[in-house]
Image: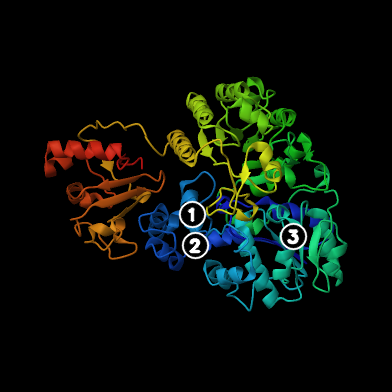
């Protein structure tokens, strides 16, 4: 029997099931092997919701988490509203697109480990085992003498797509080997495929508990290793695409062979028991491996399929067949297409099939700005259920786009934004304001371009440029105007510091770069609705029933205001002494909206007048005026509406 495990930490995947183990399980089962799967990432999300884990976060006792941070507010809210996160049937009520999903993500971020040369050495990994991941694996194993590996398991494959999973995956390997020494432990996934071979071999020398590492496409190598383990033999050095230690302890890496034709792969197997605990999952379905363009010099993902053709796509008919099967099998109707960039011809045929079959689903995909995505095709995609497209536009500066071999120029980028909007397609736009050689003036011009079309964007993500060693930019930085430097302190947006290439770009001064990042971030906040929101309507009829929607807020007294000991207010629950209605009203009150992340501070006078309403009870402006006078009531209602601290009773 073969086990497939998805370890922590990928907080963006909470509430869904990552498809890597499902694809491998379908492949192995089709070859006659018995397979079990376990999503430890989802288990970790549930583990973080235990009061014993929430309390230190809520009180600011976790390194890097201040008591006035959004994470601490999220923890206090989770302590107060556990039933809004896990239902009575055990289903997880958090995931993609839900504000509860963002709350649980915030709880996990402090525990994310960005792997570098130091954190991947054995002493650092073992030390990490004394923290939250050690507690988590300990609870996972609490039912017996080790992790719940079914009897007869001969090999456990650990899927590691993301950098922050590396340390937890190694900790899992140590625990598995300690309690099941005969079980072969195999790691694989993009985070390992992007490592340089000497680093990978050093990792194997540091962690002999890892019997093998699979690089690039995993199906054929894992099948060979699984059959060896089932037969009681072990010669991983003979398998293409595998790194391992030889019998004498010498590291060995064998070059990869071509991966599978995607159109011959069996359907993925999503385990029913794992799906049953997800309330509204977004299922990932493989559309392609590699990118049909594949030329962007700063991109790592074109490097993940060594030994195979640079692009392998699926036939639209079989792809839609799989979507239809998953709807019938699991009832889910939300899908994310796993692709670097959906090809226009595929998108056209697939969209027509979805409409013809009346397959009522929503879907999202990465897309590249391509002239073939015209208004007619984009409209067809919207009609087929396209929920949104993620587009890596990056910038509008044609000179820079050509330098890094992007497909589109300024005019094509702006056309795409306009036509997608006209066709009713929502866009999530990724921007990199400081691609190599971008000057301060060029960055400002690109910002002006996108500001003029902000109405065409559903949301914006800003990524400061990071040169990675595995990209073409990383292999020849001088060709892109970069100057390689000594290692630098910092947190890199790729969450994989080991792959970061320390460099400077003389096209901007550090001060100019910081200013550009601030400007772009402010623009993204405006588009995303988290800053500079338009004032809400403040005129309310005297007898309108209103309420403070406390279920959306963390209400607490800042430490410097003291009297309530920093206790939570709404509901009289949470860390610290309770400060229910009528108690401790001499200081300010901080209100953090867990939906929008907005933070509002009520001065002492306003807090004193509103304390009795902080349990969410309804009231009218007339009642408020009777208690405090008409002028004071008008000011309170107006300010509460502007701050988002007021809702009509019955509407939430």
Q: Secondary structure at mark 3?
A: helix
Few, some or many residues within 10 Å of mark 1 (<14, 14–19, 20+)? many
Image: 148 above or below 488: below
Mark count: 3
- Rendered image: mark on residue 594: none
Q: CA distance from mark 2 to mark 1?
A: 8 Å
Along the viewing direction, whichever of 195 and 147 lies nearer the viewer: 195
Q: Position of residue 319 (x, y in %)?
A: 75, 39
- Residue 436 can be seen, yes or no: yes
Q: Position of residue 268 (x, y in %)?
A: 74, 50
Few, some or many residues within 10 Å of mark 2 (<14, 14–19, 20+)? some
Can you tell which of label 3 and label 1 is closer to the viewer?
A: 3
Q: Are marks 2 and 1 in contact (CB under 8 Å)?
A: yes
The answer to which of marks 3 and 2 sits earlier in the sequence is: 2
The N terminus: image quadrant: bottom right
Q: Which residue is mark 3?
A: 198
Q: Position of residue 579 (x, y in %)?
A: 25, 60
Q: CA distance from mark 3 to mark 1?
A: 37 Å
Q: Quadrant of residue 197?
A: bottom right
């Amino acid at each position: 029997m073969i086990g497939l495990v998805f370890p922590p930490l990928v907080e963006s995947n909470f509430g869904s099931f990552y498809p890597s183990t499902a694809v491998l399980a379908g492949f192995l089962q089709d070859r006659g092997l018995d397979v079990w799967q376990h999503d430890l990432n989802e288990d970790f999300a549930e583990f973080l919701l235990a009061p014993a884990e929430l309390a230190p976060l809520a009180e600011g006792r976790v390194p890097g988490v201040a008591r006035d941070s959004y994470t601490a507010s999220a923890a206090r809210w989770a302590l107060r509203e556990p039933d809004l996160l896990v239902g009575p049937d055990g289903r997880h009520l958090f995931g993609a697109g839900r504000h509860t999903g963002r709350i649980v993500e915030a709880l996990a971020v402090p525990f994310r480990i960005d792997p570098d040369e130091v954190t991947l050495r054995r002493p650092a990994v073992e030390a990490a085992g004394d923290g939250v991941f050690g507690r988590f694996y300990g609870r996972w194993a609490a039912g017996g003498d080790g992790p719940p590996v079914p009897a007869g398991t001969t090999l456990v494959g650990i899927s590691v797509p993301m950098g922050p999973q590396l340390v937890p995956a190694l900790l899992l390997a140590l625990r598995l080997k300690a309690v099941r020494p005969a079980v072969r432990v195999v790691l694989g996934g993009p985070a390992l495929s992007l490592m340089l071979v000497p680093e990978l071999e050093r990792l194997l020398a540091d962690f002999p508990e890892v019997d093998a590492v699979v690089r690039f496409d995993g199906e054929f190598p894992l099948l060979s290793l699984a059959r060896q383990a089932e037969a009681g033999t072990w010669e991983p050095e003979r398998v293409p695409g595998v790194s391992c230690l030889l019998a004498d302890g010498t590291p060995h890496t064998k070059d990869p062979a071509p991966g599978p034709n995607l159109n011959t792969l069996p359907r993925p197997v999503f385990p029913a028991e794992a799906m049953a605990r997800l309330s509204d999952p977004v299922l990932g379905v493989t559309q392609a491996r590699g990118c049909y363009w594949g030329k962007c010099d700063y991109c790592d993902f074109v490097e993940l399929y060594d030994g195979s053709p640079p692009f392998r796509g699926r036939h639209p008919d079989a792809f839609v067949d799989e979507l239809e099967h998953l709807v019938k099998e699991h009832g889910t109707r939300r899908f994310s297409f796993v692709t670097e960039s959906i090809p226009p011809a595929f998108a056209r045929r697939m969209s027509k099939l979805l409409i013809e079959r009346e397959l009522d689903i929503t879907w999202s995909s990465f897309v590249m700005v391509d002239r073939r995505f015209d208004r007619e095709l984009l409209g067809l995609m919207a009609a087929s259920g396209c929920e949104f497209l993620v587009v890596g536009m990056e910038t509008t500066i044609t000179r820079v786009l050509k330098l890094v071999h992007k497909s589109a120029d300024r005019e094509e980028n702006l056309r795409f934004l306009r036509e997608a909007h006209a066709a009713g397609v929502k866009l999530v736009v990724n921007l990199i304001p400081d691609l190599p050689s971008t000057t301060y003036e060029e960055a400002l011009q690109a910002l002006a371009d996108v500001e003029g079309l902000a109405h065409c964007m559903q949301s914006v993500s800003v990524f400061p440029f990071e040169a990675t060693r595995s990209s073409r930019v990383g292999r020849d930085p001088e060709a892109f105007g970069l100057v390689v430097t000594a290692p630098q302190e910092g947190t890199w947006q790729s969450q994989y510091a080991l792959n970061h290439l320390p460099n400077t770009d003389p096209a901007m001064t550090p001060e100019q770069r910081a200013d550009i990042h601030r400007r772009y971030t402010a623009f993204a906040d405006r588009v995303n609705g988290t800053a500079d929101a338009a004032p809400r309507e403040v005129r309310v009829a005297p007898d309108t029933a209103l309420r403070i929607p406390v279920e959306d807020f963390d209400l607490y007294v800042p430490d410097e205001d003291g009297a309530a000991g920093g206790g939570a207010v709404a509901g009289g629950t949470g860390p610290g002494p309770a400060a229910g209605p009528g108690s401790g009203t001499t200081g300010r009150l901080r209100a953090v909206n867990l939906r929008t992340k907005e933070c509002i501070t009520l001065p002492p006078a306003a807090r004193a007048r509103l304390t009795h309403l902080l349990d969410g009870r309804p009231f009218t402006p007339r009642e408020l005026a009777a208690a405090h006078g008409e002028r004071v009531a008008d000011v309170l209602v107006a300010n509460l509406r502007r701050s988002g601290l007021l809702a009509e009773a019955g509407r939430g």
